C-alpha cells in the first residue's frame, strides 16, 4: 500500500508544482508581487501590534522583503531542493497512511480464517 499512496502524493505534488509555475509565469504574472505585498502588509501589522517600531521595524521589513523575493522567484536548484524535501516529507506521510490502510486486519479479536470448524 505504500508505493501507490506515495505515487499519488508525488503526482499531486508535481501537478501543483507545474500549475504554480504556469500560473505565476503565464496566467497572472503579477501574482507573486501581489502576494509579496500582502505578506509584507500583514507582517508589518503584526509587528506594530507587538510594539516593534522605528529601525527595528525597518530592518525586519527589509529582511522579510528579501526572504519573500527568494521565496517567490526561486532558482532551479532551490526548486529541485524544495521538491526533494517535500518528496521526503510526503514519503513519511505515505508511510503513516500505509500503516493505517495495510491489507491485514489489525483487529486482534478478528476471527482467524485458517481454522475450520466442522459442525456435525
Image (cartoon, helix red, strand yellow):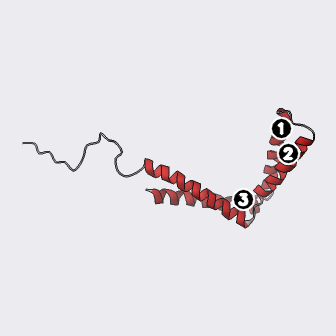
Q: What element carries label 3?
A: helix
Frontmost residue, 59 versus 114: 59
Q: Looking at the image, tell me whether mark 1 or mark 2 is earlier in sequence order.
A: 1
**Disc marking residue 47:** 1
The Cα–Cα distance between marks 3 and 2, rounded to whole angstroms, is 29 Å
Residue 76, above or below 95: below
Tell which residue pokes out farthest to the left in this image.
Answer: 120
Residue 15 visible in the snapshot:
no
Q: Name the residue under label 2.
A: 60
Of badges 3 and 1, the one in the foreground is: 1
Q: Give coordinates of residue 34: x percent, y percent.
A: 81, 51
Q: Give coordinates of residue 1: x percent, y percent.
A: 43, 56
**Disc marking residue 23:** 3
- Which residue appears at 78% of the width and 55% of the height? 32
Q: What element carries label 2?
A: helix
- Marks 2 and 1: in contact by CB < 8 Å? yes
Q: What element carries label 1?
A: helix
Frontmost residue, 115 versus 31: 115
Q: Looking at the image, tell me whether mark 3 or mark 2 is earlier in sequence order.
A: 3
The Cα–Cα distance between marks 3 and 1, rounded to whole angstroms, is 31 Å
- Image check: 55 left or right of 34? right
**Disc marking residue 106:** none
Q: Looking at the image, tell me whether mark 3 or mark 1 is earlier in sequence order.
A: 3
- Marks 2 and 3: in contact by CB < 8 Å? no
The Cα–Cα distance between marks 1 and 2, rounded to whole angstroms, is 9 Å
- Which residue appears at 67% of the width and 64% of the height? 80
Tell which residue pokes out farthest to the right in this image.
Answer: 54
Amino acid at each position: 500500500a505504500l508505493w501507490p499512496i506515495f505515487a499519488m502524493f508525488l503526482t499531486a505534488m508535481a501537478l501543483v508544482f507545474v500549475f504554480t509555475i504556469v500560473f505565476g509565469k503565464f496566467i497572472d504574472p503579477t501574482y507573486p508581487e501581489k502576494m509579496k505585498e500582502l505578506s509584507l502588509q500583514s507582517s508589518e501589522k503584526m509587528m506594530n501590534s507587538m510594539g516593534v517600531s522605528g529601525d527595528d521595524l525597518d530592518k525586519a521589513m527589509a529582511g522579510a522583503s528579501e526572504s519573500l523575493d527568494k521565496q517567490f522567484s526561486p532558482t532551479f536548484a532551490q526548486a529541485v531542493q524544495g521538491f526533494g524535501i517535500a518528496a521526503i516529507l510526503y514519503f513519511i506521510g505515505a508511510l503513516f497512511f500505509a500503516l493505517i490502510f495495510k491489507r491485514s486486519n489489525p483487529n486482534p479479536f478478528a476471527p482467524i480464517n485458517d481454522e475450520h470448524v466442522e459442525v456435525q
